[in-house]
Image (tube, helix red, strand yellow):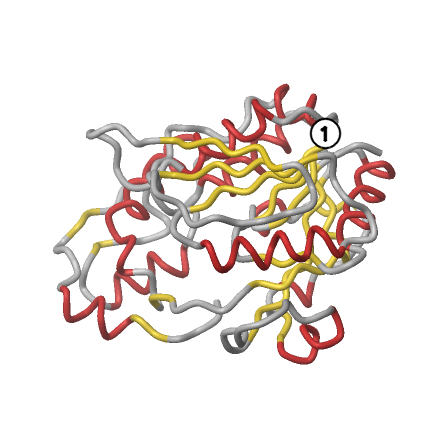
Amino acid sequence: MDFSVLVIAHRRAGHLQRLLDGVQASSWRPQEVVVVYMDDPQTDPVSCQVPLQIIHLQSAPEDRGLQLARARNTAAHHARSEHLVFLDVDCIPSNPAFSLLLRGLKDHAGLVMASPRYLRAALEEGPTPGDQALLELSVAHHLRQTLAQNEPSGRYEMFWSLGFAIRAADFQRIGGFSTAYTGYGAEDTDFAFTAREHGLPMVFSDATVFHQHHGVCKPPLNHFAAIVENARIFRARWGVWPMEGWLNAFTQRGLIDFDPGFPTLQVIREPTASEVREAYSAGAY
């Protein structure tokens, strides 16, 4: 079964190289890896035994944040295979991950999401560890542990774009990721809801990908403006609010006036630089 691995990246050369190391070690290798660099014209060199297709995407001056949806669509447009595997640049595929994702695609012909495990600390310099070592260094996401695996699920709101497989024809049929969303937040949930509208089943696969450690904001105050705007777009389109946990956290900090029962939210103030710094932690997710 032919497939392309699609990656979007922004200043993550070390993480990208470890992803590529995982691709090379996989039991099933793709025909190609398509890497779309976003607003990153000067990139560090990476190496891979699998053919690499490199694309550079530059945001327009009026764009708000990185163009994640457009970058994923660009990667899919340039892919040469009938099956697509999207991987977050922070993810290292386990040895059987691709074979399991593609088996799920063959059995269910829909949207097949990988099972992420989160590394508790940054990896040391040197060769990328194997699966057993990465298993010992990582933890499963608590929300994913409650979901049934390898069978169709109705939990489309639990779809994350960090690792998933889809047929290229289905990706094109549902229109890819909506470019109405810019910057961080909600574009992957919108994608899953659109797949549901088109009758695509969704499966949570046991295909493991290891999410590399990096610091995060909890809650993501560094993406405050994009999350608020994208939440409004999503609510207008689907009639429900996405990212309620983050919106509630913003409300508790006095940043927004939000009630999930109402169709609008109001911004009270922007987070301060000190609030963003305090929210920044060395968490894995």
Residue 4 rendering spot, x and y as whole percentages: 69, 35
Residue 45 rendering spot, x and y as whole percentages: 48, 48
Is residue 283 visible to the viewer in this orientation of the structure? yes
Is 53 rendered above or below residue 186?
Answer: above
Q: Tell me what residue is drawn at x 72 percent, y 29 percent.
A: 167
Residue 232 rendering spot, x and y as whole percentages: 32, 39
Is 54 rendered above or below residue 223?
Answer: above
Q: Quadrant of residue 254?
A: bottom left
Query: Relative to residue 62, is residue 94 drawn left or right?
Result: right
Is 193 rendered above or below residue 24?
Answer: above
Q: Tell me what residue is drawn at x 43 percent, y 47 percent.
A: 242
Residue nearer the viewer, 113 or 129? 129
Residue 23 rendering spot, x and y as whole percentages: 69, 51
> Label 1's element?
strand
Residue nearer the viewer, 186 or 33? 33
Residue identified by numbered label 1: 167
Q: Tell me what residue is drawn at x 78 percent, y 56 percent.
A: 149
Query: Relative to residue 244, is residue 267 drawn left or right?
Result: left
Q: Amino acid at mark 1?
A: Arg
Query: Relative to residue 159, is residue 242 drawn left or right?
Result: left
Residue placed farthest to the bottom in the image?
Answer: 136
Is 193 rendered above or below residue 185?
Answer: above
Task: Identify the image quadrant of the N terminus.
Answer: top right
Judge the density around disc 1: few (<14), some (14-19), many (≥20) Cα neighbours within 10 Å: many
Q: Tell me what residue is drawn at x 61 percent, y 42 percent.
A: 86
Residue nearer the viewer, 283 or 81? 81
Q: Quadrant of residue 280?
A: bottom left
Residue nearer the viewer, 32 or 146? 32
Is residue 159 visible to the viewer in this orientation of the structure? no
